[in-house]
Image (spheres, rainbow, N blue to C red):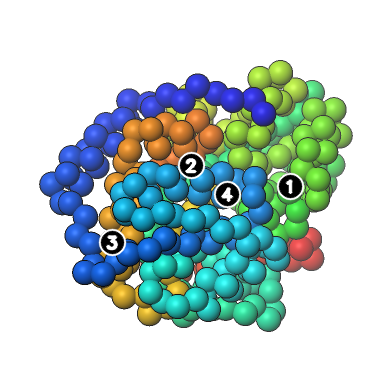
Amino acid sequence: MFTTVARIPPIAALAALALLVHLAAHPIAHAADYPVRPVRLIVPFAAGSNIDGTARQIAPKLSEVLGQQIVVDNRGGAGGTIGATLAARAQPDGYTVLMGNAPTHGMAPHLYKNLAYDPVKDFTPIGRIDSASFVLVVSAGLPVQSVAELVTYAKSKPGLLNYASSGNGTTAHLSGTLFNHKAGVDMKHIPYNNVPQAFVDIASGAVAVMFYPYQPLIPLIQTQKARMLATTGIKRASYLPNVPTVAEAGLAGLADFSALAWHGFYGPARTPQKVVDVIYAAAAKTMADPKVMASLIATGIDVDLASPREFAAFTMAEIARYRQLIAMAGSSL
């Protein structure tokens, strides 16, 4: 896979320095008897997935900070719900932690009628650790150079443009759903079980548009087989500071557009607060490490911390947001 040289932008470097100063002044206060043995970090997707890559990037430093090994345990399947169910049923002692994301805690309640866990009642939020904008790319042959031009072009050809995703009900699919709704366009969704084929079709022009994480798209962008128009966060991504957001297109309907992937830690319900505090403090210190930050930025991820209380509120907001998006998607799921 194409790789980039990790470089921390000045703003990110200053943020890291400020966080390190804060943490130095407020050292981690471990619970009296925690941790005294390895901690299992359940990653509810297969080895090699984006979330797995992030877990393995941070696990060594997190192990060092906690003083115990973090054991990454991949339990993929059913859109992340198998691993999430396993974590929900674990003992609430801090030795099983779930690395959750939008599919496990935002989408699943609305996609699975018989979901085996409640994303709120069965978990204790520990903290969000990062977020990642998608990038909006178009096939190089599409005659548009900006988001505004894409919207104008799509409106001139209603129902004729299509956009690829990694499958029905994925964040990439629902990003396109949100864009259609807010921009007032009608691009048709084309789901792919084989994402590399979607990249081939973007390169050939068989598919016009795609919302997807930045890192896998780098080869297409670098070889000019796809054109990057925007990122999908509220603010510009630190790893693409010169690329505007969708919201910067200057179109009223897109002024608040945001579509982010994210990762965070959850314990089973009734995980003791002292344990939660230890894990969150260790996670915050890990994410402030310059090497960890540089590694994540190089793969298209921004450090984006949220405390246990903030993460609880964020989870509720994500559940509500995806309820609306999935209702918009309707029969396309």
- Judging by the rendered image, the residue that carries numbered circle 1 is 165
Q: Secondary structure at mark 2?
A: helix
- Judging by the rendered image, the residue that carries numbered circle 3 is 278
What is the tally of numbered marks visible in this picture?
4
Q: Which mark is residue 57?
A: 2
- Judging by the rendered image, the residue that carries numbered circle 4 is 52
The numbered mark, 1 or 3, whose residue comes first in the sequence reads 1
Q: Quadrant of residue 280?
A: bottom left
For the point 80% across and 28% down, which residue is it?
203
Mark 3 Cα within 10 Å, few/some/many (few <14, many 20+)? Answer: some
For the point 68% across and 25% down, which residue is it?
219
Residue 100: % across, % down = 52, 61
Q: Secondary structure at mark 4?
A: helix
Residue 20: % across, % down = 23, 40
Amino acid type, label 3: Val
Amino acid type, label 1: Ser
Q: Quadrant of residue 205?
A: top right
Pick the residue in front: 148 or 83.
83
The numbered mark, 2 or 4, whose residue comes first in the sequence reads 4
Pick the residue in front: 42 or 253.
42
User: Quadrant where the N terminus lies?
Assistant: top right
Residue occupying the far top of the picture: 223
For the point 76% across and 63% down, which residue is it?
333
Q: Quadrant of residue 118?
A: bottom right
Q: Is residue 101 left or right of residue 140?
A: left
Q: Secondary structure at mark 3?
A: helix
Amino acid type, label 4: Asp
